[in-house]
Image: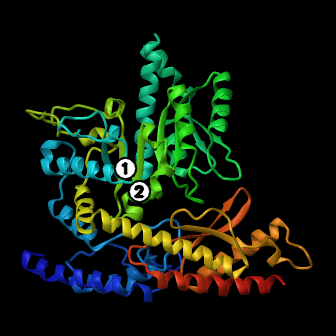
Amino acid sequence: MDASEFRKRGKEVIDAIADYYEGLDQTPPLSTVDPGYLYKMMPREAPEDPESFDAIQTDIRTKIMPGMTHWQSGNFFAWFPCSSSYPGILGDLYSSMFNIVGFNWVCSPAATELETIVMDWLGKLIGLDKRFVAIKEDGTEGKGGGVIQGTASEAHIVVMIAAREMALERIKARGASDADAKALQSKLVAYFSDQTHSSGQKAANVIGCITRTVETGSDLRLTKPALQAAIAEDKAAGLIPFFVCGTYGTTNTTAIDDLPGIADVAEAEQIWNHVDAAYAGAALTCPEFRPLAAGSERADSFNFNAHKWMMTNFDCSALWVADSTHLINALSIHREYFPPTEGSTTFVKNYRDWQLPLGRRFRALKLWFVMRTYGASGIRAHIREHVRQAKWLEQQLLVDGRFDIVAPVVFGLVVFRIKPHIIAQNGDYSADRVNEANADLVAQINGDGRVFLVGTELKGTKVVRAAIGSSFGAQSNVELLLSVVQQCASKVIAGTE
């Protein structure tokens, strides 16, 4: 394909993308193909001779499209949104054009410096403490700073490695040898609640530490007393606490942990305090949500996914550290083929030392495009509209009278179930029967095909989750969701009578 053909085909692809987004609401959001469907349709070997772009485009429509679950649909209410936008797509196009491997400043100075700048922009936009800013107001370098990771799971691994480095340095500062300190790694304990995202456990598996799951109460929040009790028990057993994760907006219910209390414990015990705000962190662009994050200003690290609720295409997970020393010490490796940079190092961030891989894409471009195209006001309006839609759905379910709202609706997530007494048959509305009915409700909704959501379980109770946040969704999509939920609930209830 030469430049002339690329121009022609590129315009066709842009048109196809625009057509796709404009027609998404007319397409069922959930793919219904059977496992192995694509294998049956594909040749067993790569083509020996070149094939036409027309043939490839035809296969996109006839073979790939049927196997896609449409995350950008306004009728997609599952998990949390994986947001997109036209500016984000265009930023990614430029990133693909440059196609750099940006492991240090010399690789492409603009890539490094733009990431530092936009991460400072974003940190200020969500009201992060100045400790997390890379470039101070006087233009000098701060201890902290932000870096774009691929996902919150990667961010979790990176900060746990930094936390381990910090813990081992403190052990050695008390007189232990390098060998003795390393031998104590097997006693390091990381703390999570029973509502913490699975990425916490995965990170612990990767670095090889002990995990302690702290049980939450009826409000599903990790609290200071519960954390203190767990740490005291582990210390008495000769273990070494080194890391705790507090969550601003859990996956199951968007509960917010006791961040001030967690910070108190972390400071007293000298352990790393990470705040995972993967979904709800985007809401901090709106000042009214910032009081709910009180305590995060005392954290050692903070992460949220701009690709979840801030119109920035996947992958773009924003991670900040208040002091990058332990992170860089843990992940920095020098080789002769990594040339040093001459002159001032204020803007020279070797981001290879802030992440797991060596190479990295120019992800800052799409975030820059989104922030400039929509502005702070446009991003806030985007968030507030989804919160309004979620509150509207909550009220309509309450007015219906057949549903319990299981958790407070704070952001864009509505968690609900059919009321136990509605499911009663001959007075029997046992927990098992209620759970079965609500699991059936999820199956009925998704089987209907017009919308897609998922269920979850809260301390043995099955519930339904509806996550509102599609960049291309509107009030009409939420109204459709309500209609489908009500119709399917009527079927479920009728089947229990």
Q: Is residue 290 visible?
A: yes
Query: x and y percent of residue 42 in the render?
Result: 38, 79
Residue designated by label 1: 127
Whether residue 32 is visible: no
Badge 1: few (under 14), some or many (20 or more) residues near its Cα, within 10 Å?
Answer: some
> Callout 2, which amino acid?
Pro
Q: From the viewer's side, name the closer residue of 250 and 256.
A: 256
Q: Residue at x 59, y 59 (%)?
A: 252
The residue nearer to you, when weighing 230 against 164, is 230
**Does residue 236 appear to the left or right of 6 in the view shown?**
right
Please tell me the numbered disc located at residue 163.
none
CB-based contact (under 8 Å), mark 1 and mark 2: yes
Disc 2 marks which residue? 287
Vertically, is 210 above or below 99? Answer: above
- Distance from disc 1 to disc 2, alpha carbons, whole Å, reads 8 Å
Q: Residue at x 59, y 60 (%)?
A: 253
Image point 62% across, 62% down: which residue? Answer: 408
Viewer-closest of 416 and 307: 416
Q: Kindly give the residue lying farthest to the top in the view shown.
A: 175
- Horizontal and vertical percent for residue 482? 59, 82
Residue 163 appears in which quarter of the rendering? Answer: top left
Label 2: state its secondary structure.
helix
Give the residue type at disc 1.
Gly
Residue 329 coordinates in the image, percent (x, y): 32, 29
